[in-house]
Amino acid sequence: MKEALTVVLLMVGSVFALIAAIGVVKMPDVYMRMQSATKATTLGIGCVMLATAVHFQDTAVWTRALLVVLFIFMTSPVGAHMLSRAAYLTKVPLWQGTILDELEGRYDTEDHELDASPESNTGGA
């Protein structure tokens, strides 16, 4: 039973990692690439680390695996957000199929602060 669960978790983690790699290659702009890479990779690493913990069945391994998963879950979204924000502020172009840029006109060009009011982008409508 342990081996079957380990294999299933490794396969699921590998599929998520493959999806992340395909997303990085196929997505049309940096923002979509960042999204596909962080979500799929986070799930992939989580499954692989869980498979490691199940396979070794040791408290020390479980602790390390859970700490790795916790670290990845906490840092990956933050890192992706910071990279995407830096890309947006340096005016990396959006994909030409993008319908709406909700941040357009909401960033102060001096201090890069986000204006919290949605009316600033729509003219109060």
Image (cartoon, grey):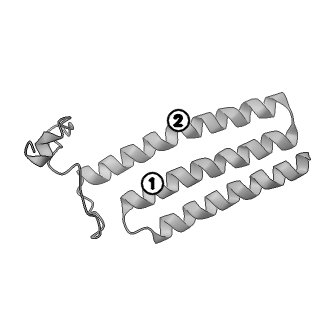
| Any part of residue 42 in sight | yes
Q: Position of residue 120 (x, y in %)?
A: 11, 42
For image coordinates 28% across by 64% down, the residue present is 98
Q: Secondary structure at mark 2?
A: helix
Q: CA distance from mark 2 to mark 1?
A: 15 Å
Q: Residue at x 14, y 48 (%)?
A: 105
**Could you tell me the amino acid type at mark 1?**
Gln
Which residue is tagged 2?
Answer: 74
Disc 2 packing (10 Å; few <14; some 14–19; many ≥20): few
Q: How many marks?
A: 2
Question: x%, y% of residue 124?
Answer: 8, 42
CB within 8 Å, label 2 to label 1: no
Judging depth in this view, the residue of 108 and 43 nearest the camera is 43
Q: Is residue 39 left or right of residue 69?
A: left
Measured as percent of width and height from the top left, residue 88 is found at 27, 52
**Badge number at residue 97:** none
Secondary structure under tag 1 reads: helix
Is 124 positioned to the left or the right of 112 in the image?
Answer: left
Above or below residue 120? Residue 28 is below
Q: Nearer the viewer, residue 19 or 87?
A: 19
Sequence-wise, which precedes: disc 2 or disc 1? Answer: 1
Q: Quadrant of residue 10?
A: bottom right
Q: Amino acid at mark 2?
A: Met
Quick check: 6 above or below 118?
Answer: below
Q: Is residue 33 left or right of residue 107?
A: right
List the single residue furthest toward the right.
1
Residue marked by disc 1? 35
Residue in the image at 87% along x and 52% along y: 4
The reply to whether residue 109 is in sight is: no
Q: State the image coordinates of residue 42 (x, y, percent, origin top left).
A: 58, 47
Callout 1: few (<14), some (14-19), or many (20+) C-alpha neighbours within 10 Å?
some
Q: Which image quarter holds the C terminus?
A: top left
